[in-house]
Image (tube, rainbow, N blue to C red):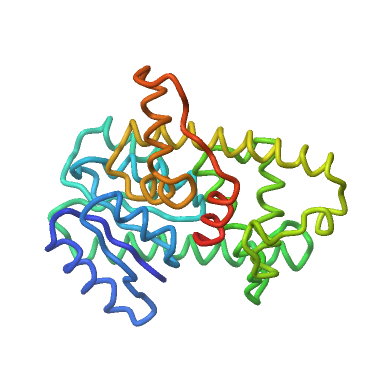
Amino acid sequence: MNFYIVDDDPAIPMMLRRILEQDSANSVVGTAAAAPQAMADMMRLDVDIVLVDLLMPGMSGTELVGKMKALHPELRFIMISQVKDADLRAEAYQAGIEFFIDKPINLIEVKTVVEKVAQSVQMATKLNDIQSLIGGGITPTPTVDPHQEQKEKILSILRFLGITSEAGSADILAITQIMIDHQLSFREIDFNAAYHIDDREKKIVFQRVRRAIKTGLTNLAHLCLDDMGDEIVVEYANTLYEYKNVRSEMLYLEGERSTRGKTSLKRFFDGLVQEV
């Protein structure tokens, strides 16, 4: 199992790493002292189980779990805390954690809880394998499909931007896949040939895409207003829109500017491929 540990007390990740890696099947693939770094890492690392502190500066462990569950529902979370408050614990379970581990850390408790969650992960994997064999569901195949991985990464970014329900999201996915498959920049795509469309139809496609991208800009600006320290938000602001445009959108939303931030199809798609 691959583990990730989030705790602002540097002694806790060191202690948990020693306990977890006593089992040769376990590996701690990363640690962080705060939620923004943890979210950025978990977007790129292969993680099965996350151990996260409840109370941290900035974003709480419960908030972190809620955001990551929305992006990666398959992730399993174990909460670490010395807090006994029933309401706080109830919120954590509602956000999606599996178990609590109490501080101070107890070796037996850690091993017992981790074993239960690991068994749950293994059981879910076996169930998915069985369903795929009998045609009961769409699950990962034994061999890694790079196209599927790329598609999931693109979709995770579109989900983060809140635009998967937009009409242009399917076009964004298709265009990005063309760029990746043929190693093209946005401006190098021959849309008439790739889509088998004329100029009028191309204009309609671009209109759908622009509406979706503009919605993403507005949603990203709202996220920036809520948490300027979120590293993923800042990264996407720079890569997909150029931060000055997100800043302009923020000022517009706050009523301090009369014009909105601008979007660029080239910037968005070339940045999206870079992220993927």
Residue drawn at point x = 59 percent, y = 38 percent = 163
Q: How many marks?
A: 0
Q: Is residue 116 above or below residue 162?
A: below
- Which of 175 and 50 lies nearest the eye of the viewer? 175
**Residue 104 falls in image quadrant:** bottom left
Q: Position of residue 53 (x, y in %)?
A: 23, 50
Taking the view exactly as shown, the residue that stands out farthest to the bottom is 24
- Which of 212 and 132 lies nearest the eye of the viewer? 212
Left or right: residue 219 compared with residue 53: right
Q: Position of residue 179 (x, y in %)?
A: 66, 62
Left or right: residue 62 compared with residue 155: left
Q: Is residue 9 above or below residue 25?
A: above
Q: Position of residue 134 (x, y in %)?
A: 78, 64
Q: Quadrant of the N terminus?
A: bottom left
Q: Position of residue 141 (x, y in %)?
A: 68, 70
Residue drawn at point x = 58 percent, y = 51 percent = 266
Q: Quadrant of the C terminus?
A: bottom right
Q: Is residue 213 above or below residue 133?
A: above
Residue drawn at point x = 46 percent, y = 65 percent = 119
Q: Is residue 267 above or below residue 219?
A: below
- Which of 221 and 201 lies nearest the eye of the viewer? 201
